[in-house]
Image: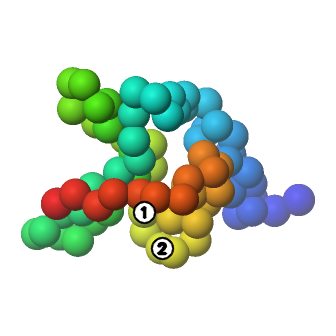
């Protein structure tokens, strides 16, 4: 058993714990103009409150976010 490969399983389990209500929220990638950091999460349609789910560091992270929540359309905000 390796110490390095357990982190990926933990990330999948943590993502599944954050609820996503498709009627009240939509998926968003927030990008920083200054640093280029991207954060995936959900934004409430009524209040505009952003719930951060994970930091997107690579295409694999984006695919994991998309697959976990079965998303087809993700908006990008800066």
Badge 2: residue crowd in 10 Å (few <14, some 14–19, many ≥20): few
Q: Residue at x 40, y 52 (%)?
A: 40
The quadrant holding residue 15 is top right
The quadrant holding residue 32 is bottom left
Badge 1: residue crowd in 10 Å (few <14, some 14–19, many ≥20): some
Vertical order, 50 against 62 (above or below): above
* Residue 70 visible in rendering: yes
Residue receiving disc 1: 56
Residue receiving disc 2: 58
Q: Residue at x 61, y 30 (%)?
A: 17
* Residue 39 visible in rendering: no
Left or right of 30 on screen, residue 53: right
Which residue is outermost to the front? 23
Please provide percent x and percent y for residue 23.
Answer: 46, 29
Vertical order, 43 against 5 (above or below): above
Vertical order, 55 against 26 (above or below): below
Q: CA distance from mark 2 to mark 1?
A: 6 Å
Please provide percent x and percent y for residue 27.
Answer: 41, 47
Quadrant holding the C terminus: bottom left
Q: Secondary structure at mark 1?
A: strand
Q: Secondary structure at mark 2?
A: loop
24 or 20: nearer the eye? Answer: 24
Which residue is outermost to the right? 1
Please provide percent x and percent y for residue 18.
Answer: 54, 31
Please provide percent x and percent y for residue 43.
Answer: 32, 37
């Amino acid at each position: 058993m390796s110490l390095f490969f357990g982190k990926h399983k933990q990330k999948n389990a943590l993502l599944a714990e954050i609820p996503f209500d498709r009627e009240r929220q939509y998926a968003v990638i927030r990008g920083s103009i200054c640093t280029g950091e991207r954060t995936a999460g959900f934004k409430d349609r009524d209040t505009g409150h952003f719930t951060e789910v994970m930091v997107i560091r690579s295409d694999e992270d984006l695919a994991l976010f998309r697959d976990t929540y079965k998303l087809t359309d993700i908006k990008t905000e800066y």
